[in-house]
Amino acid sequence: MSPSSLYKQGAIVGAYEYPSRSMPDKTAVQVQAECLVKALDEAGLSLKDMDGLCSTRIPGMQPISFAEYLGVYPTYMEATQIGGSSFVLYLIRAMEAIAAGRARVVGIAYGSLPTTEGRRIGTGTRIGGAGGEVPVEYSFEEPWGLPLIGTYALCAQRHMHQYGTKPEQLAEVGVTMRRHAGLNPYAKYRDPIGVDDVLNSRLICDPLHLLDCCIISDGGGAVVVAHPDIARNAKTKPVWLLGSGEAAMHSSSGHRDFTVSAAAQSGPIAFKESGVSHQDVDFAMIYDAFSINVIMTLEDLGFCKKGEGGAFVEDGRIGLGGQLPVNPDGGGLSSCHPGMRGMFLLVEATRQLRGDFAGTDRQVPNAKVAAVHGIGGFYGTRHSGVTVILTSE
Amino acid sequence: MTEDKKPYVKPLPVPNMESEPFWSALKEHRLQVQQCKSCSKHYFYPRSHCPFCYSGDVEWVGCSGKGKVHTFSVIRQNMAPGFREEAPYVVAMVELDEGGVQMMTNIVECEPGDVSIGMPVQVTFEDVTDEVTLPKFKPA
């Protein structure tokens, strides 16, 4: 095994997910700050030990506005906005910064309250953001009325046409995530569902049903990355980075393959760098914005051949106890989705690798290697993909 | 133009120097895309260089308006003004006969349930405002 040059140059020493999915008595930045303090605290660290800060999306000039709220003065900052995968990207950046001697303790935090604020995710217009500027490409998309969910539906429809992927196979993803959520006391939706429940739920954007879509919840989380000298003395078991890869996928100038995602680029880079094979991976954390993402990501990361993702998710293969458990926390489809789920992929991967759930059905037995893939943006138009391979060894 | 005088509330394109010929041709009910004279590839959306070989030697070419549905979705929920009232409607990627280049559009003049991948379609021009014409597609 010849892992990344970043292997053992830094470690995740703290990981925290806010337990509630509805926080009407809090502000988003307050949730984000509380999560960061908790993640530092479990490692035996505090805000005064932290010299690097990464955050995004919270209104303001990030991460400076967040530093102001906390009362800290970071010497390393990162706020690149590539959608829900941003936090997975920050993990790579934090490891790089620590390896380069630019930081010792980097905090990565997120808080968002769409339930409390009544914000719609996925079914509104996609134009927005600061300054009211309209990106060039939007003139060729916005007039047609394609909501975020529709961008994922374009991929699902083509995948079904090209490879015979069935609605029942898409549904299987949501069913498995719900089964996992039943083991997570903090998950938003915990009652078991079956394939028929998914197929009988209303269509939002064909072929995606309501239960093919991630939930909307309040949420917050944080991870703390530290220099190995600090990790050695931390109260927690360190989690290391074996490999990482990044990718941008877009319209390919009018020649897009809608059955392929950014993971087809980021995955092979991360796996090659990690030196591990797919058989070495004990579980995967895959951003399940919609059921189709899990199927296409499993193919693109190389866990099965292109077109075979539908069959792969059947027969309990991606469930706890199966060949490759995916999202043991219940994922964005049932546990927690405040808009950008990348943060929770890191928290659950870290906690599984540390064995935090030992003695419960949620724990992946002897979890030593995790494949984590974050997605950001709009699947069928433009999106990011960030893959990291993590290990407890 | 629709007969009633209700204001058009859906998002409108914002032409810039690179895309203006695309939108002005549509006003004359002509569909044109760009093709690279160096590598012969058609590409979309419009820009000043070829995104395949990076040549600046590119030209506008008229389209037959014929193509087929590459992928699509029946949109049943969109809370944005204009679309909310219209749902269900179809958003599709249409693959033009010219080089197979894809563009996003609506499939109109048929039931959403009748749209399928591979279906032959033909452009139809919708003058949505005095300044803007949108290319939509109908079954061929």
Image (cartoon, rainbow, N blue to C red):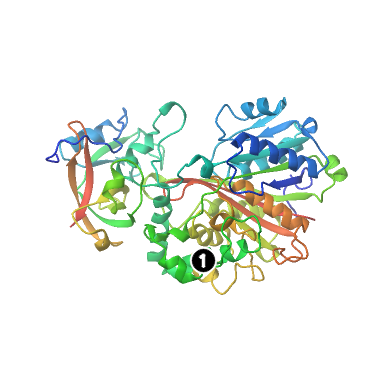
Q: Quadrant of the N terminus of chain A?
A: bottom right
Residue at position x 47%, y 60% in the image: A212
- Residue A247: image location, x then y, percent: 55, 46
Mark 1 falls on what kind of element?
helix
Q: Which residue is mark 1?
A: A309
In this view of the protein, which residue sits in the foreground, A146 or A17? A17
* Mark 1 neighbour class, 10 Å CA radius: few under 14, some 14 to 19, many 20 or more: many
Observer able to see residue A57: yes
Left or right, B81 with reference to A386 = left
Task: Identify residue type, mark 1.
Answer: Gly
User: Which residue is most to the front?
Assistant: A25
Q: Quadrant of residue B3?
A: top left
In this view of the protein, which residue sits in the foreground, A389 or A114? A114
Q: Quadrant of residue A112?
A: top right
Residue at position x 44%, y 58% in the image: A210
- Residue A340: image location, x then y, percent: 55, 45
User: Which residue is most to the bottom?
Assistant: A315
Q: Quadrant of the C terminus of chain A?
A: bottom right
Observer able to see residue A1: no
Q: Is residue A119 above or below residue A76?
A: below
- Residue A86: image location, x then y, percent: 59, 41
- Residue B121: image location, x then y, percent: 22, 56
Across the whole image, how many numbered discs are drawn on residues?
A: 1
In this view of the protein, which residue sits in the foreground, B33 or A197? A197
